[in-house]
Amino acid sequence: LCWASDPFCEARFEELFDTPINLIDPRDLETLPNATVFREGLWFDQIGNLPSANALNYRDYLAEVRHCLRQLTPHREWTRVVEDFSSRHGLADALGVHIRHTDNLNFYTRWAAESPDFDSRSISSLDGFMDAIRARIANMPVFLSTDDAGLEGMFKRTFPGLVTFPKRYHTAGVRTTPIADALSEMLLLGRCCRIVGTYY
């Protein structure tokens, strides 16, 4: 794995994961024989669009990616945090609500122009998320994950019983929260029995 800390992910691999893995220095990428280097976050789709991918069975590709992702073991510090929070708030029986309402909004115009699968009528609305929470919060825990502090505050005022992870919001840089908090929230969403998420 080549892991480069950058403004989008400021942590080192070993700060987030305990998985034993061979790490490649970014400066050594160009020296790898027969390697195709993907520098974008969209590597998953880029591999699928390679000319050589025609020989690739997409289901086999998904299975291999799933297998590799399952090999990643979060650092025991985050695992303890996630286990404790999930247990205290009954997330195994919860609806997880994931609202990406900062960077996602900036991409909608581009996706509408470039992606034939993008449906502008399906863009998530805050009212839609409110309806999903309102329909379930009386009967099950609802866990909200979002990268927008103002939005989180507004939802918590509307639904006092809403469960949220105590993130450290900050305004400096590209991210609104530290990557360790984002990883913890992702793992917590994975503990929920259902997830409602932002379109596309």
Image (cartoon, rainbow, N blue to C red):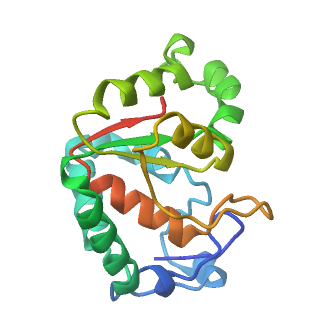
- Residue 118, percent from left and from top: 52, 20
- Residue 89, percent from left and from top: 29, 58
| Residue 166 showing in the rendered view | yes
Question: What residue is at 53 percent from the left and 10 percent from the top?
Answer: 121
Residue lying furthest right: 172
Of 177 and 42, the residue lying toward us: 177
Of 185 and 117, the residue lying toward us: 185
Question: What residue is at 32 percent from the left and 35 percent from the top?
Answer: 137
| Residue 50 showing in the rendered view | no
Vertically, is 75 above or below 135?
below
- Residue 58, percent from left and from top: 26, 42
Question: What residue is at 37 percent from the left and 76 percent from the top?
Answer: 81
Determine whether, in the image, residue 137 is placed left or right of residue 149. Answer: left
- Which image quadrant: the N terminus? bottom left
Write down the quadrant of residue 87 in the picture: bottom left
Of 45 and 143, the residue lying toward us: 143
Vertically, is 70 above or below 145?
below
- Residue 19, percent from left and from top: 33, 84
